[in-house]
């Protein structure tokens, strides 16, 4: 056998081994990435309970991730990868605390010795929500959500930090989803963690009187994320599904962690019901399809069932606690009316108008009035809707809100006032920042101009 005939098989064998190694290495990294996306919030939350600092907790959790990237490609993915990461992160937290102790730094704010840190449970949590959680992870996640959404932070900072810590998104992914430069998002997150640390925000679920206000902040952040995914404020796409999915996941998590809070279930119901329409909200070219023109056969029946079940839970809790439906539950009830109608023409607009009346009492706002005008216009005629819309034209809060002239244009078109309607649609298009939205409004202006 010649040298050449010996060499060729050996070279091919090495190439096969190299390719196999690379494939295994890539598969391991994919597994690590998947586990991290799902479990990172739990890991950060567990460590934050020990060190009482979200920024530090995230750093220690990231150190555990680095350890996984170093060890798993050689030793293989462990049977319980999430458990491996949690254990690694907790060990790093304990090492950090021991280091502080050795340096003689005071740990009085931690309140317990090192061994107690691992088993620390805050009993105030049960008093606050009236329901014990199934395990420490549930407690820790809820604390993490309330801390990331603390009112001491700006709204933008709360959204960014929540997506980072609880959504498991990278800074690049958050920047792409929110259509802002990556350095801007990075600065928001860094400043948010610094603000929480400097303000000495406790890693806990607020008690009694503070709970309602803080819970409202949490729900607001989750719904802001969902809304941006459901109807993007800017860019080329009508929707950003990844953001909507993250908000849905956070809403479901909250519903499990705070089962006795009606508005948590109300928000979950609202998002499930609205998300059920996603497939029908754009056509094959990605252009928006408005509610009354949607193919309801494309609505997701599973999400509708989940939404209706969550709404029933919210209603039952309100009845048991002898309190009226909150704003999210009322909006979910409105979405349920749409979900229950087999066609647009079969929609119970009278009930929807009544629900908006109730919503205007619970959570009055110019946007609620605008939506109420739509419902009233559908239930009682366009002139009735205009009587609500016209006073809103002077509202400063809606001055740059494109849907105000859009809704007015629709009502005017139904009354046969086509030139006025066209002017309103053109004005709405000028105010729109989303390209798909602008195209829709310009098309409506053209259509009504030919009427």
Image (spheres, helix red, strand yellow):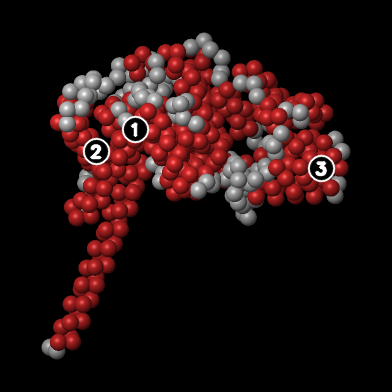
Residue 381 screen position, x and y as percent: 80, 29
Q: Is residue 315 left or right of residue 130?
A: right
Residue at x-position 78% and y-position 26%: 391
Give the SS element for disc 2. Answer: helix
Residue 54's disc is 1
Label 3: how many Cα within 10 Å (few below 14, some 14–19, many 20+): some
Between residue 305 and residue 430, name the one nearer to us: 430
Q: Earlier in the sequence, mark 1 or mark 3?
A: 1
Between residue 372 and residue 64, name the one nearer to us: 64
**Quick one: which residue is furthest to the left in this view?**
1
Label 1: how many Cα within 10 Å (few below 14, some 14–19, many 20+): many
Q: Is residue 200 left or right of residue 13?
A: right
Q: Earlier in the sequence, mark 2 or mark 1?
A: 1
Give the SS element for disc 1. Answer: helix
Residue 13, picture quadrant: bottom left
Residue 423's disc is 3
Residue 308 screen position, x and y as percent: 53, 28
Q: Which residue is mark 2?
A: 89
């Amino acid at each position: 056998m010649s040298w050449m005939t010996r060499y060729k098989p050996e070279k091919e064998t090495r190439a096969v081994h190299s390719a196999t190694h690379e494939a295994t290495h890539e598969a391991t990294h994919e597994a690590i990435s998947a586990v991290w996306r799902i479990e990172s919030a739990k890991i950060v939350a567990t460590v934050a309970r020990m060190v009482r600092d979200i920024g530090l907790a995230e750093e220690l959790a990231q150190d555990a991730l680095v350890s996984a990237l170093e060890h798993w490609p050689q030793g293989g993915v462990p049977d319980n990868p999430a458990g491996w990461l949690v254990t690694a992160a907790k060990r790093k937290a304990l090492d950090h605390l021991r280091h502080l102790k050795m340096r003689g730094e005071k740990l009085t704010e931690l309140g317990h010795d090192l061994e107690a840190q691992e088993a620390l449970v805050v009993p105030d949590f049960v008093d606050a929500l009236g329901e014990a959680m199934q395990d420490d992870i549930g407690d820790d996640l809820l604390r993490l959500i309330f801390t990331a959404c603390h009112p001491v932070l700006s709204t933008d900072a709360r959204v960014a930090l929540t997506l980072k810590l609880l959504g498991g998104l990278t800074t690049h992914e958050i920047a792409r989803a929110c259509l802002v430069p990556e350095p801007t998002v990075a600065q928001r997150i860094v400043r948010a963690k610094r603000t929480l640390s400097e303000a000495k925000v406790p890693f806990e679920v607020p008690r009694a009187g503070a709970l309602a206000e803080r819970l409202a902040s949490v729900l607001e952040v989750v719904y802001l994320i969902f809304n941006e995914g459901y109807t993007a404020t800017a860019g080329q796409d009508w929707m950003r599904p990844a953001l909507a999915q993250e908000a849905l996941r956070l809403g479901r998590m909250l519903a499990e962690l705070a089962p006795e809070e009606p508005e948590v279930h109300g928000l979950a119901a609202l998002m499930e019901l609205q998300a059920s329409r996603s497939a029908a909200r754009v056509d094959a070219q990605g252009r928006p399809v408005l509610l009354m023109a949607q193919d309801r056969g494309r609505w997701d029946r599973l999400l509708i069932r989940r939404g209706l079940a969550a709404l029933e839970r919210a209603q039952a809790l309100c009845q048991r606690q002898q309190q009226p439906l909150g704003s999210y539950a009322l909006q979910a009830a409105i979405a349920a009316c749409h979900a229950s109608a087999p066609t647009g023409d079969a929609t119970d607009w009278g009930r929807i108008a009544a629900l908006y009346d109730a919503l205007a009492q619970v959570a009055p706002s110019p946007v609620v009035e605008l939506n109420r005008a739509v419902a009233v216009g559908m239930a009682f005629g366009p002139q009735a809707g205009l009587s609500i819309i016209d006073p809103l034209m002077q509202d400063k809060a809606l001055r740059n809100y494109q849907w105000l002239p859009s809704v007015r244009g629709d009502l005017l078109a139904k009354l046969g006032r086509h030139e006025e309607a066209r002017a309103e649609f053109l004005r709405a298009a000028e105010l729109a920042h989303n390209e798909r939205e602008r195209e829709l409004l310009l098309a409506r202006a053209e259509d009504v101009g030919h009427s």
